[in-house]
Amino acid sequence: MQHATYGSELLGRTLAGAESGDESPLTHMAVIPTRTAEFSEWPDWVHPEVRDAFTEHGLRRPWRHQIEAADHAYAGRHVCVCTGTASGKSLAYQLPILTTFAQDPNATALYLSPTKALGADQLRATAQIIAGVPSLSHLQPSAYDGDTDSELRQWARMHSRWIFTNPDMLHVGICSSHAKWRQFFAKLKYIVVDECHHYRGVFGSHTALVLQRTLRIAHRYGADPVVIGASATVSNPAQALSRLIGDDVVAVTDDTSPHGERTVAMWEPGFVEGTTDTERGGENGAPVRRSAGAEAARLLADFVVEGARTLCFVRSRRGVEVTAVKARQLLAESAPELVDRVAAYRAGYLADDRRRLERALSDGELLGVATTNALELGVDISGLDAVVVAGYPGTVASFWQQAGRAGRRGEGSLVVMVARDDPLDTYLVHHPDALLERPVEATVTDPTNPYVLGPHLLCAATEFPISDAESAGWHADEVIAGLVDDGKLKRRKAGWYPAPGLDPHGDIDIRGGIGGQVLIVDATTSRLLGTVDTSRAMTSVFPGAVYLHQGESFVVDELALDDGLALAHPEEPDWTTTAREVSEVVVDRIVEQRSFGPLTVSFAEVTVTSQVVGFLRKALTGEILDQVPLDLPEHQLSTRAVMYTVEPDALVAAGIAPDKFPGALHAAEHAAIGMLGLVATCDRWDIGGLSTDLHPQTGLPTVFVYDGFPGGAGFAERGHEAFDGWVAATDEAVSSCACTSGCPSCVQSPKCGNGNEPLDKEHAIKLLRLIGRHYGS
Ligand SMILES: Nc1ncnc2c1ncn2[C@@H]1O[C@H](COP(=O)(O)OP(=O)(O)OP(=O)(O)O)[C@@H](O)[C@H]1O
């Protein structure tokens, strides 16, 4: 049994062992105090057999929030329960659903999770609870996803009352053939949307439309299901779920489950020796910090030596391997008997692997595991002593999801967030409130994006003709008019019908972004490695690109865009590749615009034309090797941008001479893109940017930050809405960075199409101050 201050003590011992001579890597420490449980009585409406099943499984007294949420759902109100990880959210939906099943043998329910693995875990947990309960013996809960074979699918459709699936399968396997599911839909009482913070950006918009289509089908068959959302980390949960389902939702957010004291440490790796003062640095000679992965491996090894059960989250699959190998090497030197107690959890996502790993960690057979975010959702390990988060996972929500894995009930634990060499990470470890005190970000979804909405309208029309009221509810009048013009929809008396022969469901890939896909194939074996949006293929799978797949490395030989194919071969070079790109932005329509003296800030529809002209090879240490030219076609993207212009006179008055405009604008653009994740739920790879000292349309120095998806994804719009906070944080991030002339932690971008040139940190700060002064004045 560990005591409450265990986390702080473990941190103290680790710091004492850190290399001497370095500045302390600890930038901040916070202690989240212990919370004691608040209980409720089982409500009268709960079926006694259901209640007994839970008590037999050790759930003797429900926590207050569990009952509050269950009460809402049972009373017919859509509810979103948003309480911490492992706070027993499952009970909140299991109680009303199982009680309803016990009362009405024909009732049905759907459970949706963003990953198949989580669905499998929840199915297993449910099956255990209901085993041996007579009133629930007819339930036959079943998985219905991409892994379910066709015979089982048919069986599940005929016999199962509770289907565990995901939005992809719901779209393509259930809504598309709703007539076969008629009985199921007609008695559909509940839909569970688990981990609902995952449904954001384009994936979120797709899922929203799938859910709304599902509800629509259920209504047509006479049912009126209640939706229960669950998430440990979603801001404004009522609004988030409400956007997904297009209906009102109540939220339950007061977490009444107990937890132990949690120490959270912010950690910034030191510089690699010799890179701060010589020419040997990274791009443009910038100093290079030790990688978050290497630092995380050290922490993992240290914690294992201390006997702490530790999970280490690393962002890339390859990083996971590298971290585990490195930790094992360190242990081989200091404590060889512990080498085999550390493992990597790779993708594969097989439920069996997860369970073996959960068991090995719970038994203490394994002490340390490096993993991708595959283990972020729904792992039910009886609690870990420490969690290392190597690199900000992109959202506050995800951070807490990972951090929440630390802590056995009532006992102390430690979370260490290790910063990568990147503006947002650096900002967060120096401004811990922006991570620890900030509410999780709003999930940004935009189900009205015509590129997403159009294909779903075709699906909806083939499911049932679309009425005028439905069109209005989806804000779809304009998009429908376009589909009518294209001959895909026809107007008849009862609404819009699909053109004959239309079979639109297969054309939507819920996770594939928008537009077509390029298949990435290992030409030596013909194995399909993965897919990438056509719009991103040129910057990620150009000839010569290093492509990572589940920890294996490949080099692309050929990109055949017309065939939707990229051919690669296995190879493990000692470098990474980054595309070099030239682009221009044309403003098609200003949606919103505000001027403040010399500053004008707008939200606009734009067309971005870009062309990859070569790529940069970078050694794994961050040093630049060379640039390789390429000859690829131009690519166009219609999207949405937040943009600003500044009068040249004002720039000069702020101390930025005209020859400094390009470097100042470019550096400010990069830093702002790096910081957009603070106000919108996105990372910099979702976003593009362009800056110019003279834009042909505005005639002024102009900066654009745009969504990297056709039609936009809502990120630029958030940037526009939260413009002042975004600019202030960007200014703060750049000004407080310790480097002299710009580094990856402030104004350099790992994906700059321009080789990070020109960049002028000093004048970017002046520009950001100028914007901050004028905005809102
Ligand atoms: N009232 C309770 N008393 C004691 N244990 C409980 C109670 N409710 C749930 N638990 C236990 O807490 C653990 C976590 O529950 P559950 O998986 O439902 O949490 P969760 O909030 O869904 O977690 P996650 O955020 O990982 O999805 C389970 O082992 C469950 O049996």
Image (tube, helix red, strand yellow):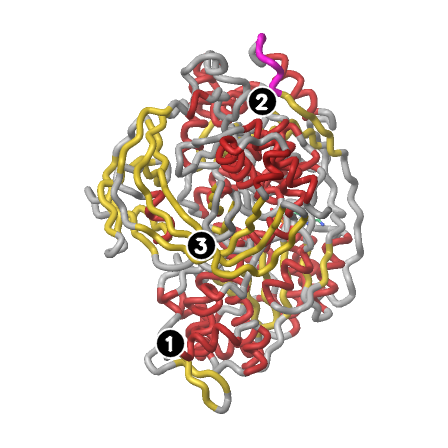
Q: Residue furthest front?
A: 649
Front residue of this view, candidates 351 and 480: 480
Location of mark 1 (residue): 486
In this rendering, position of residue 418 left or right of residue 41: left
Image location (x, y in percent) of residue 5:
73, 25
In the rendered structure, find residue 307 and report the number of the disc placed on it: 2
Residue located at (42% from left, 25% from top): 283
Q: Is residue 569 left or right of residue 457?
A: left
Residue span colored magenta: 20-25
Main SS of the magenta part reads loop
Residue at 31% x, 43% y is 541
Q: Viewer-nearest of labels 1 and 2?
A: 1
Q: Residue at x 26, y 33 (%)?
A: 571
Q: CA distance from mark 1 to mark 3?
A: 26 Å
Residue count near mark 1 (Cα–Cα under 10 Å), binned few <14, some 14–19, many ≥20: few
Q: Quadrant of residue 84?
A: top right
**Mark 2 or mark 3, which is nearer the start of the sequence?**
2
Residue 549 pos. (x, y %): 35, 40
- On the image, the x and y values in percent for residue 147 come to 39, 57
SS of the residue under disc 1: loop
Q: Secondary structure at mark 3?
A: strand
Q: Secondary structure at mark 2?
A: loop
Q: Earlier in the sequence, mark 1 or mark 3?
A: 1
The amino acid on which the numbered mark 3 sits, given as a three-letter code, is Val
Q: Which residue is mark 3?
A: 586
Q: Amino acid at mark 1?
A: Asp
Packing grade of label 2 (10 A; few <14, some 14-19, many >=20) is some
Give the camera-side residue of 2 and 502: 502
The amino acid type found where label 2 is placed reads Gly
Which disc number belongs to residue 274? Answer: none
Residue 380 visible here: no
Whether ligand 1 has any atom under 8 Å from the Cβ at mark 2 is answered as: no
